[in-house]
């Protein structure tokens, strides 16, 4: 009898461990689950500061977008986020929940019904739901307070049938690029505007890392880069602005060409601003 009880106790403990491991794996899967981005973009203004976000293609994000424009009071929480309460609660899915919040994210906390902007990384024991990713003004979120105006941004130029052109500005100089019609170029365009750090690489190129990786399907490979070539290096997920000549490389995709200011690419440094033209 004693041996039987020991076996039963062991089996119960084993089942409990399996359930805990299964729960942990489900939480991890939800945290790591990629969400598709939509074409919806919003801007949030407060105290002369502006942050812009691109929303995910989720039910909650669409419901939030449909309520705009809004003017709402901001409340600070744990010196990590500014939150506000939209008039209507949002419908969320358990499969889209996450716990590790990252600086620059726009998210929703269903138990309280608040939308919040993170200006610091934030871990929550309860489940949060991402609404969007920050595009610009992330460093300005902390300085916001009082009330905020939340509104929709203009539709993307690709939806209007226009040629996609972007400008890159730094230290008083501007370079204008015309993008091709590839999926990767459209993905980059959809993330604008951006304020981002630029780096020099190899004495031939300036590079930066957009918040989201670009889809390279239907995107041509670079055959021979030259000053003015705009490209995307998929293995590193960085956008490349060439100011010197370069043959080619596996995974280097063509995004477009500089049509003005090619001679200024070499001088880019620090923080650059990239905008749709």
Image: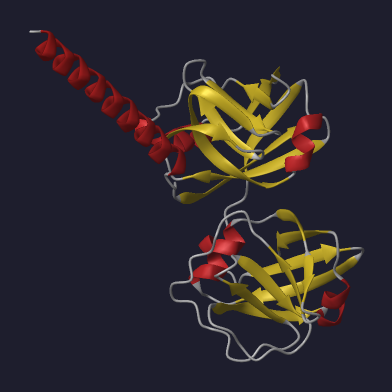
Residue extending furthest toward the top: 1
| Residue pictured at 68% horizontal, 27% vertical | 81
Say which of 96 and 179 sits in front: 96
Say above or below: 109 vs 236: above
Q: Judge left or right: residue 204 versus residue 188.
A: right
Residue occupying the far left of the picture: 1
Q: Position of residue 234 (x, y in %)?
A: 55, 70
Color encoding of the figure: secondary structure
Image position, residue 49 (x, y; %): 80, 37
Q: Is residue 255 above or below residue 66?
A: below
Q: Write the residue at 20% across / 14% down.
A: 9
Q: Quadrant of the N terminus?
A: top left
Q: Is residue 23 left or right of residue 115?
A: left
Quarter location, residue 7: top left
Asked if residue 46 can be seen in this view, the reply is no
State left or right for residue 132 relative to residue 44: left
Q: Nearer the viewer, residue 162 or 203?
A: 203
Q: Quadrant of residue 11?
A: top left
- How many marks the image carries: the answer is 0
Residue sitting at x 69%, y 89%: 246
Decide if residue 7 is in sight here. Answer: yes
| Nearer to me, 7 or 124 | 7
Residue 84, position in %: x, y? 63, 22
- Residue 80 lies, in percent from the top left, at 70, 26
Instruction: Describe residue 200's horizontal placement relative to residue 74 as left or right.
Output: right
Which residue shows up at 86% across the image and 65% down it?
269
Q: Quadrant of the C terminus?
A: bottom right
Please, is residue 274 above or below residue 54 in the view?
below
Furthest-right residue in this view: 172
């Amino acid at each position: 009898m004693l041996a039987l009880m020991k076996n039963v106790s062991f089996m119960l403990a084993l089942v409990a461990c399996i359930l805990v491991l299964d729960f942990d794996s489900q939480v991890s899967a939800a945290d790591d689950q990629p969400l598709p981005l939509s074409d919806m973009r919003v801007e949030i203004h407060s105290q002369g500061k502006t942050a812009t976000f691109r929303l995910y293609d989720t039910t909650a994000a669409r419901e939030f977008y449909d309520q705009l424009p809004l003017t709402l009071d901001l409340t600070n929480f744990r010196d990590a986020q500014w939150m506000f309460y939209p008039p209507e609660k949002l419908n969320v899915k358990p499969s889209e929940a996450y716990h590790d919040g990252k600086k620059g994210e726009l998210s929703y906390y269903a138990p309280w019904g608040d939308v919040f902007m993170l200006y610091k990384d934030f871990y929550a024991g309860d489940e949060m739901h991402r609404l969007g990713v920050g595009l610009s003004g992330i460093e300005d979120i902390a300085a916001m307070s009082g009330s905020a105006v939340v509104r929709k941004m203009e539709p993307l130029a690709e939806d209007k049938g226009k040629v996609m052109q972007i400008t890159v500005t730094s230290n008083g100089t501007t370079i204008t690029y015309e993008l091709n019609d590839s999926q990767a170029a459209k993905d980059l365009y959809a993330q604008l505007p951006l304020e981002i750090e630029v780096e020099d690489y190899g004495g031939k190129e300036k590079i930066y890392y957009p918040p989201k990786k670009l889809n390279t399907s239907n995107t041509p490979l670079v055959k021979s880069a030259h000053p003015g070539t705009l490209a995307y290096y998929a293995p590193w997920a960085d956008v490349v602005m060439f100011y010197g000549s370069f043959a080619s490389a596996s995974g280097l995709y063509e995004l477009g060409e500089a049509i003005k200011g090619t001679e200024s690419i070499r001088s880019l440094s620090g923080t650059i601003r990239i905008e749709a033209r």
